[in-house]
Amino acid sequence: MAKLGDWIEPHPTGIYIPAADAWVDPSQPVPRALITHGHADHARGGHGQVWATPETLAIMECRYGPQNGTPIAYGETLRMGHVDIGFVPAGHVLGSAQIVLEHRGERIVVSGDYKRREDPTCAAFQPVPCDIFVTEATFGLPVFRHPETHDELDKLLTALRANPGRCVLVGAYALGKAQRVISELRVMGFDDPIYIHGALQRLCDLYVEKGVDLGELRPATGVAKGELEGRIILCPPGALNDRWSRRLPDPITAMASGWMRVRQRARQRNVELPLILSDHADWDELTTTIRELAPREVWVTHGREDALVHWCRLHQIKARALELVGFEDEDD
């Protein structure tokens, strides 16, 4: 008797689907790749052929150059070998998708990275009932319960108003987090120009091209120090404490990341204003999603696998850790 899901093969470098002769999010170049989203630990360059959403392909081209890519819209299904494959929103970043695989009367959903919070920069997570749910566990510990987004950004605005002679410098991951911080501030009614590090420019431009309203953005480099007083400036996390930031007017150093829940991480980066803002599901959202989908099995990857596997087994859900390599604790 065939074992549930034995038609896909988890490998340390990704998930292989023999019946389609394709890989999901492979960490090394392969002839045929299905990509969930554009973060570098999921989307690598050098594949022979790539299937992804139009937005993810655009992000990959922005980062790696031209791709031999086939765009797959949300809700569209393609037949590859003997497998039906669909892409549905994951709610993680622009273009992020869960990949739905159907074969032999079974449905497997490979979620990639996902979140359940509203986000003005990307389509909301779409629940897909399935036999096997392959879930991330980046924040798969009960200590990780993310606060409300606007409550965190209120801290930023309060600090800005209280220190008119300083600026607030926010470290934010270049793909997804930076654009979300900007867009959420616009939703909250903050209409002033926002200044950005040059490393964020290309992806911000891409988001605007894809219809995401980011308001007025200005380059932060080459601007007189006085012009930056009382301003919000965004940069990659690596630029928070480097030479580039030293020319700014007494910056209040902030960082937008789910990891800011961990005080030691904030101290290590000399962050004065930690902003707990994540593009991943927290513990409650991970467990709520599993309950909602009611899969027969849960396969857990990249993160705190052991705790989520243990929770599943306590709730009579068969679970296993895949232990894929190459998926990093990005500066979420």
Image (cartoon, rainbow, N blue to C red):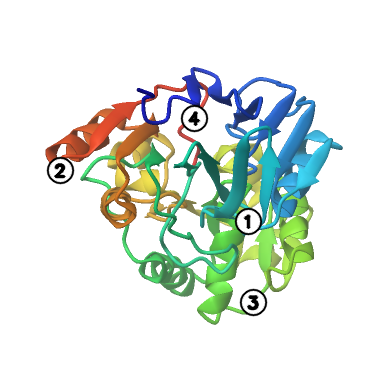
Distance (Cα) linking label 4 and label 1? 19 Å
For disc 4, the marked residue is: 328
Among numbered discs 1 and 2, the one appearing first in the sequence: 1
In the rendered image, the residue lying farthest to the top is 12
- Mark 4 residue type: Glu
Residue 192: mark: 3
Residue 94: mark: 1
- Mark 1 residue type: Leu
Q: Residues within 10 Å of mark 3 (few under 14, many from 20)?
A: few
- Mark 2 residue type: His
The x, y position of residue 272, in whole percent, is 40, 50
**Is the Cβ of the residue at disc 3 closer than 8 Å to that at disc 2?**
no
The residue at 54%/41% (across/down) is: 101
Q: Quadrant of residue 115?
A: bottom left
Among numbered discs 3 and 2, the one appearing first in the sequence: 3
In the rendered image, the residue lying farthest to the left is 314
Mark 4 or 3: the one toward you? 4
**Can residue 131 be seen here?**
yes
The residue at 50%/28% (across/down) is: 327
For disc 2, the marked residue is: 315
Mark 3 or 2: the one toward you? 2
The x, y position of residue 23, in whole percent, is 62, 28
Residue 10: mark: none
Distance (Cα) linking label 1 and label 2? 33 Å
